[in-house]
Image (cartoon, rainbow, N blue to C red):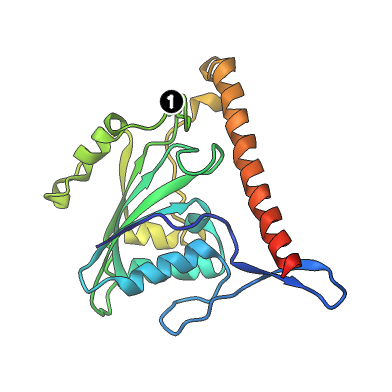
Amino acid sequence: MVLTNPPFGRKSSMTFVSEEGEVGREDLVVVRDDFWASTSNKQLNFVQHVKTLLAINGRAAVVVPDNVLFESGAGETVRRKLLDECDVHTLLRLPTGVFYAQGVKANVLFFDRKPASEAPWTRELWVYDLRTNQHFTLKQNPLRYEHLRDFITAYRAENRSARTESERFHRFTYEELVARDKASLDITWLKDDSLEDTDNLPPPDVIAQEIVEDLEAALAEFSAVAESLARVRES
């Protein structure tokens, strides 16, 4: 079993100093014989790596940002291969901002590795939407265990075949998934009230706190980059 939260950030890269003394960054494409696709996208590589770590019938729950669900190119290749070679049975769409920074949208992808088969292993994917019309912040209103109770009940770890659909929990067949553009798993069906009803917006102090948290997260990221560049220049 693998339970993991990969490093967020779109690209794997290295910092270099040119002969003229200019500092730059270059994307690193990871090439491995046991990967389905070669890419510099860290999360796609992480998902592929997790699959290689699993024994047959091993289980995984991986936190992934939204781009893993819809990115084209290598992203589409990884999703189609994952659906074919593994049983991708559950996707939990988390509220915005519960990982790293307020603007980050994350999900938990649950899948089991299976032995080689001519037929695809994924029969159906159940998607639980804990994001639409849900509002949490990292500090003032964090996601807690009680907010996950309905998902835990719906998940039915003891007998997934007994699952039933609800307002937030929907079933999608393999045929429906692969027929979607780029085999996208970025699936929504609930109406987002905040897009049409300004009365549903959070109180001003909550919005202000979210802005502060976003700025603090961005400042931390910029500080890390500046420190990295300084170390390169000093070496």
Say which residue label 1 marks. 141
The crowding category of the residue bearing disc 1, from other C-alpha atoms within 10 Å (few below 14, some 14 to 19, many at least 20), is few
Q: Which residue, as the protein is rendered here, is positioned at the far front?
A: 234
Residue that appears at 54% across and 36% down? 102
Residue that appears at 44% across and 37% down? 95
- Out of 12 and 129, give the one closest to the viewer: 12
Task: Give the percent coordinates (x, y) of residue 89.
Answer: 28, 56
Residue that appears at 12% across and 50% down? 159
Q: Is residue 198 left or right of residue 7?
A: right
Location of residue 11 by image quarter: bottom right
Count the labels in the image. 1
Q: Which residue, as the protein is rendered here, is positioned at the far bottom?
A: 33
Secondary structure under badge 1? Answer: loop
Task: Give the percent coordinates (x, y) of residue 1.
Answer: 24, 63
Task: Give the percent coordinates (x, y) of residue 225.
Answer: 67, 55
Q: Is residue 156 left or right of residue 101?
A: left
Identified by mark 1, the residue type is Asn
Quadrant of the drawing holding the C terminus: bottom right
| Residue 196 visible in the picture | no
Location of residue 39 by image quarter: bottom right
Residue that appears at 62% across and 44% down? 220
Relative vertical location of residue 157 with respect to residue 146 in this rendering, above or below: below
